[in-house]
Image (cartoon, coloured by chain):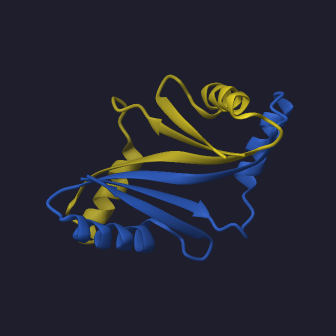
Chain colours: A blue, B yellow
Amino acid sequence: MKAHVWVMLKPTVLDPQGQTIQRALCSLGYQKVEDVRQGKFFVLDLDGLSRTEAETEVERIAREVLTNPVIEQFRFEILD
Amino acid sequence: MKAHVWVMLKPTVLDPQGQTIQRALCSLGYQKVEDVRQGKFFVLDLDGLSRTEAETEVERIAREVLTNPVIEQFRFEILD
């Protein structure tokens, strides 16, 4: 079983890395790109868990380990 | 219009960052997590493009700017 976890800065938090990419794209001629935000994406391989157990486990991992709750938010999905 | 871009290390390329996270999770008691791979996730805001133009533009941005083709691969989706 696999899980996907997305960790992004909260919408209210400035993303200087994304802004730098946006400006770089603009200077390269991609002027239709108005905003860029960069986040992290994790693929987890899970073994020996039911779907419900996996949801509980991945939610806890995302919340406690992968995300800084002060500035980041996460979402996840479980794949069979 | 928004675009999502995922950039991951190719499956044949070692991911030491993902391995470190996997070991950290294991030491924290999450022993059901057998493997972790970490990638980047970008959200692009696009203005004034048709869906077809956006697909062409985002594909080119992902290929030429966001991805190191030697070790990384990408996929993307366009959202209305």
Picture coordinates of residue A3, whole percent (x, y): 34, 55
| B19 or B45, nearer to the observer | B45
Q: Is residue B78 above or below residue A39?
A: above
In the displayed orientation, state which residue is furthest to the bottom.
A70
Total numbered circles: 0
A70 shown above or below B45: below
Left or right of B36 on screen, residue A49? left
Q: Quadrant of residue A51?
A: bottom left
Expressed as whole percent of the image width and height from the top left, the position of residue B77 reads 57, 40
Q: Residue furthest left?
A: A48
Dividing the picture into quadrants, the one containing residue B3 is: top right
For the point 62% across and 34% down, which residue is it?
A: B66
Viewer-side residue, A20 vs A35? A35
Residue name at image x 51 percent, y 33 percent: B74
Residue A23, image x, y percentages = 82, 41
Residue drawn at (85%, 32%), measured in percent from left and top?
A27
B79 or A11: which is nearer to us? B79
Relative to B64, say whether A47 is above or below: below
Foreground of the two, B23 or A5? A5
At 54% from the left and 71% from the top, the residue drawn is A68
Q: Position of residue A25 (x, y in %)?
A: 78, 35
| Vertical order, B36 against B31 (above or below) | above
Is residue A3 left or right of A1 when viewed as pictured?
A: right
